[in-house]
Image (spheres, helix red, strand yellow):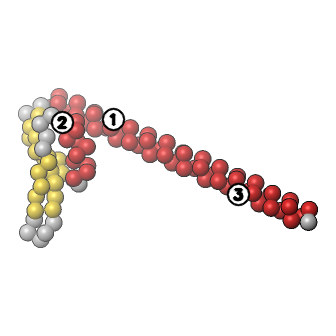
Amino acid sequence: MLKIRISGTQEELEKIVELMDDAEIVKFKHKKGKTTYAIDTIMTVEEFLKQNESIRALNEQESEAEIEKQIQYEKNIKTINQELTDLLDVINDSDSSD
């Protein structure tokens, strides 16, 4: 059996808690006022490897979503640029016909 302490931000640990059955986020207050968060758990090596695979898959999904978001952003920029160019062409055409 492995006894594991995973520390990180509360948001990071919440993602891990979703994948683990017995995980609970523990909040630690330090003397200097700093707050840290951790998850303590006991699991077999096989369970650890399975959880690690699930976390990796979740991270890949989030990465793919970020890539898709960036692609959509770039498409929007191109569309806006084209619309502005078309508008400038119309304005220039109307100025030259006067």
Other-residue count near label 1 (Cα within 10 Å), few / some / many at <14 / 14–19 / ≥20: few
Give the spatial CA distance, label 3 vs label 2: 51 Å
Q: Is residue 8 left or right of residue 80?
A: left
> Which residue corresponds to mark 2?
20
Q: Is residue 31 above or below residue 82?
A: below
Q: Is residue 26 above or below residue 34?
A: above
For the residues bearing labels 3 and 1, Cβ distance under 8 angstroms: no
Q: Which mark is residue 8?
A: none
Other-residue count near label 3 (Cα within 10 Å), few / some / many at <14 / 14–19 / ≥20: few
Which residue is drawn at the image coordinates 13% and 69% (left, top)?
A: 33
Which residue is drawn at the image coordinates 23% and 42% (left, top)?
A: 16
| Badge 1 element | helix
**Could you tell me which quadrant the C terminus lies in?**
bottom right
Give the image location of residue 34, x and y in percent. Answer: 15, 66
Amino acid under label 1? Answer: Ala
For the residues bearing labels 3 and 2, Cβ distance under 8 angstroms: no
> Which residue corresponds to mark 1?
57
> Which residue corresponds to mark 3?
84
